[in-house]
Image (cartoon, helix red, strand yellow):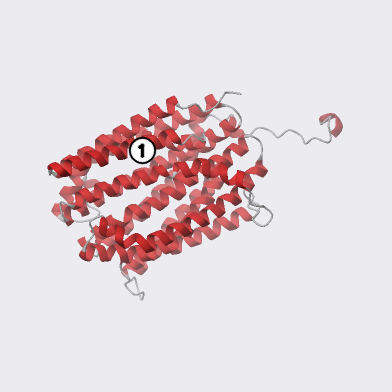
Amino acid sequence: MTAAALNPNPAAPAARPPDPLLSAPLLPTLLRFALPNMLAMVATALAAIAETAYVGSFGVASLAGMALVFPLVMLQNMLSAGAMGGGVSSAVSRAFGAGDPARASALAVHAMWIGVAAGSVYMVLMLVFGPALFAALGGQGEALSQAVAYANVAFLGSVFIWLVNTFSSVIRGSGNMKVPSATLLIVAVAQVLIGGALGLGWGPLPRLGMAGVAAGQVVANFLGAAFLLSYLASGRAKVQLRVRSTPLQWPLARDILRVGAVACLSPLQTVLTILILTRLVAHFGTNALAGYGIGTRLEFLLVPIAFAIGVASVPLVGMAIGAGKVARARRAAWTAALLATGLLGVLGLVLAVAPQLWTQHFTTDPEVLAAAALYFHWAGPCYGLFGLGLSLYFSSLGAGKAFGPVMAGTVRLVLVAVGGAALAWAQTPPWTIYALVAFAMAAYGLSTVLAVRMTSWGVER
């Protein structure tokens, strides 16, 4: 049979075969995608935990200083990886679902420049306004000095962090989870080794303290960004990064920003919630603040776990939406949500019963341990609902429908702000603050479920 017989209209390109992810079994595919992501995200979180252990060896004042700056460090990761990164993965996966890989490659270039711009802005804002913000959160004396020492180095590498997470999101949007996961795993290991060597002064190296610990993050992410840039530009990836030959076009940038910019409100809400609670807890003293900082470290570990599951659903949801398979997109979202709810729910219940499994790794101070345990007794049982909301948030990014889950985050923020103000006015004991944390987590998860059920994801084609 001739080529003309196979393609009766030689002027028209042959139809592209549908992407295998449009028909792959959902649960096995989610697990296959989520496991490498989870390994990388947990490694990233463990790197942050290692930093906390390093900082803990410097004393309680350093731990309190880390509690002040850490929410802003994690805000950067959530903005670049989860929010704007979700917008990037969503746009790339929808392009592949529609059978347009050229558009996906052009979107990758636009994503890179968005990451460079956002990282530069974040760096300037944190270096200029960071000290005043830490003071406004209740930082004072040695705790404030330690927070500034860490922040002045850590935020110098903001562009590198944005690029690592942006490039990872581009690759994930094409359905490749292994390369970004392996890269982030190596970055985490490098961060632990370099930060420990410079912060603690291993071997002949000087002991740089908080600045040295922060330097580990900067160097490791620079190396990761350089590798992913070379990988995308080499032609080995499904997405091709052709910077010089791709003109900037507003419609392509808008396709990313219409999801990513709206999604950025969610991590801002999350961190603002944490900052409000940090300010409330700071009223009870340095030991309470240090204990709360240990407790919230676990919440920032839960985010990567839910991220690993939720982001695994993004290419499945995005490609299905691009191909007009709305029912399949919704099945992928609910399957991922059930996985996240079960995993985080079990973890939360274990730590509510045995908080020492986590807290004993950071300090031996009895008052700090008691404050952290009180936090887990109240917040732990609601971690499952928190994971439910986070997973559905990421799946909604894949569908290009971020508004509903963002509004659910607003519900949580308002509850904490209004409830916290009332509790502070009444001068209630610390446990009431942690009970408010638990109630707000539950409200967030249930509100997200309602928002997803009420939002149209398009018409089945």
Quarter of the image for residue 375 reads: top left
Q: Amino acid at mark 1?
A: Gly
| Left or right of 285 in this view: 105 | right
Q: Total label count?
A: 1
**Residue located at (32% from left, 55% from top):** 70
**Residue located at (58% from left, 23% from top):** 460
Q: Position of residue 270 (x, y in %)?
A: 34, 44
| Left or right of 173 in this view: 369 | left
Question: Which residue is under mark 1?
Answer: 409
Question: Would you say residue 298 is visible in this rendering?
Answer: yes
Above or below, comparing residue 233 to residue 25 in the picture: below
Above or below, comparing residue 381 to residue 237 in the picture: above
| Left or right of 450 in this view: 276 | left
Q: Position of residue 136 (x, y in %)?
A: 26, 56
Q: Position of residue 18 (x, y in %)?
A: 65, 32
**Residue located at (21% from left, 65% from top):** 141
Above or below, comparing residue 31 to residue 207 in the picture: above
